[in-house]
Every structure is written in structure tokens, then in C-alpha cells.
Amino acid sequence: MKTRIDIIRHGEPVGGRRYRGHGVDDPLTDKGWRQMWDALPQNPRWDHIVSSPLRRCFDFATALAEKLGIETSIDDDFREIGFGAWEGLTADEITVRDPDALEHFLDDPINNRPEAAEPLRDFSARVCNAYNRTVQQHGGQRVLVVAHAGVARAITAHVLGMELQSVYSRFRVEYGGILTTTVETGKAPKLVIESR
């Protein structure tokens, strides 16, 4: 039995690039909507859509499900990581507050979390549980997960068996970027990364 799980990152949200975890729930801009529609394959053939509960994902997931005539569901565990004290701040704003904080975070995102931020290992565990649950619930189907860059990174580390730090430090996911994973009974999962 072969199960395909595609993960698409949301498009550009209102407010532009900033540290936006699950504490900031901005909707998509018009450009963000276009990025997502443009990222889709010509003839999408998903059986189900699972979405993060945040508006930048769920609004699109609902619109796409209606267009395709399929069901959508929310999985709270696919929400973005919590950035604590950095929620809603740009890189420049963080640097003004603490000139070294961002550099330390980027060098070691596991051990240099913002104050009150969700621990990276806890985030990764909840995302991987959601991914495994999706595979089990939709075995043999093609499913689209509408989520976030952090979610895509966590799944990449999980599927490839990579260290969290190397994935979080080096792996960039663009708006509308798509990750494709396949899970076949008795075989190791496979991963393909697309960016349009």
C-alpha cells in the first residue's frame, strides 16, 4: 500500500516576513493567495486536505477543498512553532532588542530559543505525530497538508532521519513550496522537494 502526503507551505501573509508562529494569525495577502494557487499541479488529485488551524493555511485549504469537491480537516499539531517573545517581530526588530540573539538562534536553533518559545524538540515531536497519524488515517490515499515552513522542516528531518539542527539551520522553504513524501508498506519513506 502506497500513501502520498504532499506538504505545501502557506503563501505570503499580511505583515510580510517576520517571526510568525502560532501566536500570530495573519491572513494571506492577495499575493499569498496567488502564490498558493500557482504552486498547485495542473490536475490535482488529492483525496483529502489536512490543514493547520491558522488562517494563512486554513482559508486556502477550505477554498481548495471546495473547488476540488473533497473534504478538509484541521489538525492542531500541524500549527507553526511558537516563537514566544519574538512572535510578530521582524529580524531587524529582534536585532535592535538584542544584537546577538538572532545570530545565536540561527547558529543553534535548538539551544538558543527566544524567551517562552516552544522547545524545538517538542514541536518536532508533535508534527511527526501528526504526520504519522495522517499516514495511518489515510493509508493508500493522496493527501495535501497545508502548513508552515517549520512543519515542512520537521517532516523533512523525520523522513530523512536527519539531525534537527542541520535541517532547521540550512533548509529553506519558500512561500508555496511543496514537499512530497511517499510511504509504502515495508519500505522507508521517500521525500521530494519542489519549489515553484
Image: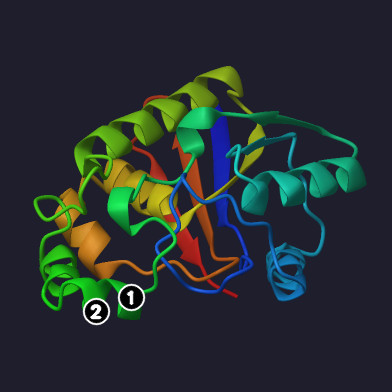
Q: Which mark is residue 93?
A: 1
Image vertical order of residue 93 relative to residue 189, above or below = below
Q: Secondary structure at mark 1?
A: helix
Pointer 1 and pointer 2: residues touching (CB < 8 Å)?
A: yes
Pick the quarter of the image with the N terminus. Answer: top right
Q: Position of residue 160 (x, y in %)?
A: 28, 48
Q: Amino acid at mark 2?
A: Val
Which amino acid, mark 1?
Glu
**x%, y% of residue 36?**
70, 64
For mark 2, give the secondary structure.
helix
In this view of the protein, which residue sits in the foreground, 77 or 193? Answer: 77
Q: Is residue 42 left or right of residue 29?
A: right
Task: Report crowding for label 1: few under 14, some 14 to 19, many 20 or more residues within 10 A (C-alpha).
Answer: few
- Where is mark 2, residue-wise? 96
Q: Quadrant of the C terminus?
A: bottom right
> Which residue is at the front of the view, 186 or 92?
92
**x%, y% of residue 141?**
65, 31
In this view, the residue farthest toward the front is 97
Left or right side of 17 for 48: right
Mark 2, Cα crowd under 10 Å, few <14 / some 14-19 / many 20+, is few
Which residue is pictured at 39% across the width and 66% down the height? 89
Total marks in image: 2
Spatial CA span between label 1 and label 2: 5 Å
> In this rendering, is residue 104 above or below 63?
below
